[in-house]
Image: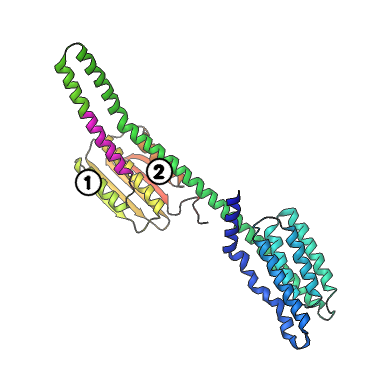
Amino acid sequence: MLNSRLKDKKTNLTSFWNWGPLLFSGFYLLPSIFQIESTDFMQMFTIVLLYLIFIYLYVKATLRGTEQVWLQLMSLILVCVIASYLTVGSATLFGFVAYIVGYNFSNRARIFAISILLLALLSSSQIINENYAEYFLSGSLILLVALFSYGIAGRNEFFHKRREKQNSKQLEQFAAIAERERIARDLHDVLGHSLSSIALKAELASKLSQANRQAQARSEIFQVAELARELLSDVRKVVTDLKELDIDTQINRLIVRLEESGFKVIRNIKVVDLPAKLEGVVNLIIKEAVTNILRHSSAKYCEISILQTLDSVDIKMKNNANETSQITLGNGLSGIKERSLQLGGKAEFSFCNQQFVAFIKLPLSIKSERAE
């Protein structure tokens, strides 16, 4: 809770909505400067002192974030009323108090607070010189409405950024969960069958040894050792694949794998610059698609197309296959579809002209991912 409040204060310190309007509060001093010859020292000193007190209270209220600040608000209104006895420049200060009302208060509390401010403004208009009352009141109301609206806009921006930050964290959590599930699927595919075979062959070797069939037992033990070495190699490949690569390097490696397996590969890659997170997802999708081709494609032909447009990345992968009436989504294709949907994209799988076609479209700006 404390960390959250400190972060909110840091946001307030760097937000233009909070500090930008304060630059114009100096207009409060202009009437006194223009009439400095007719203003005695004590009156000028009091005007400046009230201004400094106002700035202090304003900053203190702003640092409270979006909390309601009744004490600071009433103190600011009191300073404005007192300043109205000395200078018509207090009209400027009323506008800045309206900004605090718009930013720090919500709904019913905001209506009540602005009503108090308007009452104080009307009272102050009766205090100043009647020759300036009309200009004072009209100028104050214009500033009050403008900065009150400005404050509401600042409050809306604050909550909008906070929601975006929360959504961004949720997206990262979902991506981490999806990645863990993918790793679990990969490890299951690599380890499951091999470990089952090792267990069965080790058990068979034990029974053969008990039956004094030593030659066969040694053969089974030798096969267990071979399976263990192959399993170690497969695990190393999985770990290597988990390391993040740039998209060009990833594609080149995958094409080498396909060519080593006897595939003829046609490539069409037109990618300029992808956001880091999106590039990582594209790498994972291509890797899973190639793995799916290596496991299930009997024909040795494959096309890989990755095109970056103004607002999306289009991935299309084709390989020769026998058409079937229904496409079954295994772990690989399911993983591709899940990743695409999580980023606000889509993944479609179909058969066309004796070819299996996977088409994936991902938006360049990932949904729910915004800067704070």
**Image quadrant assignment for residue 271:** bottom left
Q: Secondary structure at mark 1?
A: helix
Q: Range of the magenta residues?
A: 226-243
> Residue at coordinates 43% horizontally, 40% vertically from top-left?
178
N-term-proximal mark, 1 vs 2: 1
Looking at the rendered image, the disc whose residue lies closer to the viewer, 1 or 2, is 1
- How far separated are the C-alphas under marks 1 and 2? 25 Å
Locate residue 103, reporting x and y percent.
67, 60
Looking at the image, the residue that sits furthest to the top is 211
286 lies left or right of 170: left
- Residue displayed at 59% across by 66% down: 16
**Closest to the observer, 205 or 53:** 53
Q: Residues within 10 Å of mark 2 (few under 14, many from 20)?
A: some
Instruction: Choose top left, top right, bottom left or bottom right for residue 56.
Output: bottom right
Q: List the single residue furthest toward the bottom.
A: 37
Determine which residue is flagged by label 2: 347
Quick check: marks 1 and 2 in contact, CB under 8 Å?
A: no
Up the image or down, 177 lies above or below 145; here it is above
Which residue, given by chain and number where applicable, does mark 1 sit on?
A: 256
Instruction: Please indicate whether residue 153 sits to the left or right of residue 348 in the image.
Output: right
Q: Residue at x 34, y 59 (%)?
A: 272
Q: Is residue 369 magenta?
A: no
The answer to whether residue 241 is above or below residue 86 is above
